Amino acid sequence: MKEARGATAPFRFYTRLQMTELTGRRASNLQELTDTLRGISGSSIYHHTHRFLQQHQSLSPEPPNDFAYWIAGELGEEALAERLYSLDIMRFDSIRALREAIVATIEGYVRTNPLASLKFAAEGGEFHFLKSVSFIMPTRYEARDLREFADILSRITVDSIYYHVFESRLRLEKGKNDFSKWFEECLGDRELAALVERLDPYTQTLEDLRRNLLRGIERSL
Amino acid sequence: MPLIEDYAPIIGQSVIDDIRLLSERLRGRTVKNVNSTAVGGGVAEILNRMVPLLRQMGIEASWDVIKGGDAFFAVTKKIHNALHGGAETLTAQDKEIFMETSRANIEAVDTGAEIMFIHDPQPMGLVAKKRDNKWIWRCHVDVSRPEPGTWDFLMGFIGGYDASVFSAPQFSRELPLRQFQITPSIDPLSDKNRDLEPERIASVMEKYSIPRDKPVVTQISRFDRLKDPLGVIEAWRLVKKYIDCRLVLAGGGAADDPEGMQVYAEVMERAKGDPDLHVLLMKQNDLEVNALQRGSDIIIQKSLKEGFGLTVSEALWKGKPVVASAVGGIPLQVTHKHSGLLCRSVEGAAFALKQLLNSPDYARTLGANGREHVRRNFLLTRHLKDYMLLFLALYHGEDLVNI
């Protein structure tokens, strides 16, 4: 077995455990939805664009976007839902930017389809705003080279993968996922860093993401 | 009682490792749960399994049950129905009965734990004894459209708590305290849910004289109007015009539910003389409930209201196809046409039953998807993790917490 190159600094794996906080706020039409979207906490925007990825791991690839799901299912506006589904979350590096894009998409659609603003959800079908509260903890796993990294990656929870890939990049506004950062900065492996950055994590299950990450690393070893 | 490690083959060792990591942040904390019944109903069932697990995690967890007479439980049943949207409001005398029993329990229950965890409305009044410790109100019922007078009465207590917990988003409303969503859970290692040998299943079906000569549709629920047992019979009769099958209605009563026997009598009257309709008033027997679920071809849960509807997760965990009302927490457990079929009426339930009875392959696929969904989201270990996070959240107000 080829010896893996050592890193200039080890990679500490963290995990994050999440709970859902209820805001008590709800919307029954597009106007109420956008009004609330403008003022609600970033943790709520984050929740509704990432929740599905965590809870329905066997269903994915599914649109990980509660707003789109509700707009299609309750208001019957499939075309708007599709625009929201297909928002490329990877191109946003902050929740603020993502929030603005969601609001602009809905408002743009309503301008050209004014009848959409007259639709109301049936009683009991309102959109309920929730938010994610995340607890971040260091695990006991630390990798000093790529081989150790792969070994740990194959065993850690999907919560840990989730933290380093999604939460750290967008919610903590680090710009890129933690794995790519370490590959580039501590292993000097730009190719692997770029390859991992190109994996769109929003269109695969977390287990598929793990498999794809491991496949990319194996090629680099 | 199982050890946390016993769950590793089901949920994976790495998930257990995370739970242990989390528990280190809470070691030695004292947490007291208080509810109104030690047996019967979902709350007691969860606490029976949860409290020992919390203790295994190094948390000093305990559980007390408040005391109350028939008059108190008649009032709390009224509160339960009113929270579920019933029209009947509380009278001044009802409120006095509630307060009087609450005062007696305030005297009797030690509330000195660092975290007091109060379940449902019955023990809510204990919060009057709050000192500088943390108090959580865990609401297990559907309060999406409560009767306003009753809700106002309870608001007098809710304001005293530090946090509240609901089972589904639609139960929340703007409140002057933090609210968390925590779904309940089932224990895959309990007698009610563990794997059973085919012989054991057969012997229970035989004991209750349920031949398996034709498909068996079953609803497991206590005899309660909100579980709509009469609606289930009506739906089954619509199905039976086309497909020969049996119906089993099985359940017991909870110590805090005085209305149960009356509903049971109505069901018996409606079932009279039909050899394919099996109405079973059972004593608490988890193994037998497990066997009845496993011995059935389809599980129905046609509730009019639900706090969560754990019987749905129980059925899904056994890989059974499920027809269930889209109420309370049921849509969180059943994604329509993926992990079961949702319905909103007697006719809708009958149609869904016919679909499943006529398409066994489809029914099997729904059951398998449902089991996986429960494995990931509705097992006791996920619930344990959520409770520990809730306890930590009492001491951290932010959305991103480094611990």
Image (cartoon, helix red, strand yellow):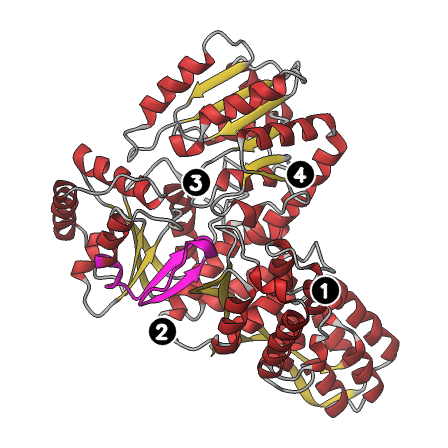
Residue assigned mark 3: B305
A65 relative to B306, above or below = below
Q: Which residues are magenta?
A: B156-181
Whether tag 2 and tag 1 are in contact, CB under 8 A, the answer is no
Real-space Cα distance between discs 2 and 3? Answer: 34 Å
**What's under tag 1, amino acid-wise?**
Glu
Q: Disc 2 is attached to a residue of which chain?
A: B
Q: Is residue B359 visible?
A: yes
- A205 is higher (above) or lower (below) than A194: above
Q: Give the alpha-carbon distance from disc 3 to disc 4, as whole Å.
A: 23 Å
Identify residue for label 1.
A82
The amino acid marked with disc number 4 is Gly
Inspect the magenta stretch and tell me whether residue B174 lies in it.
yes
Q: What chain is tagged by disc 1?
A: A
User: What kind of residue is marked 3?
Assistant: Lys
- Residue receiving disc 2: B395
Sequence-earlier tag: 3 or 4: 3
Task: Name the residue beneath numbered marker 4.
Answer: B367
Circle 1 SS class: helix
Residue B5 vertical position relative to residue B74 in the rendered view, above or below = below
Where's the C terminus of chain A, which quadrant? bottom right
The tag earlier along the polypeptide, 2 or 3, is 3
Q: Residues within 10 Å of mark 1 (few under 14, many from 20)?
A: some
Of the residues tagged 2 and 1, which is closer to the observer? 1
Q: Are marks 1 and 3 on the same chain?
A: no
Residue A138 appears left or right of A109: left
- The image shows residue A144 at horizontal and vertical percentages of 71, 83
Q: Which secondary structure lies at badge 4?
A: helix
| Residue B273 versus residue B120 in the image, above or below | above
The one of B267 and B316 positioned closer to us in this rendering: B267
- Do the residues indicated by labels 3 and 4 lie within the same chain of the protein? yes
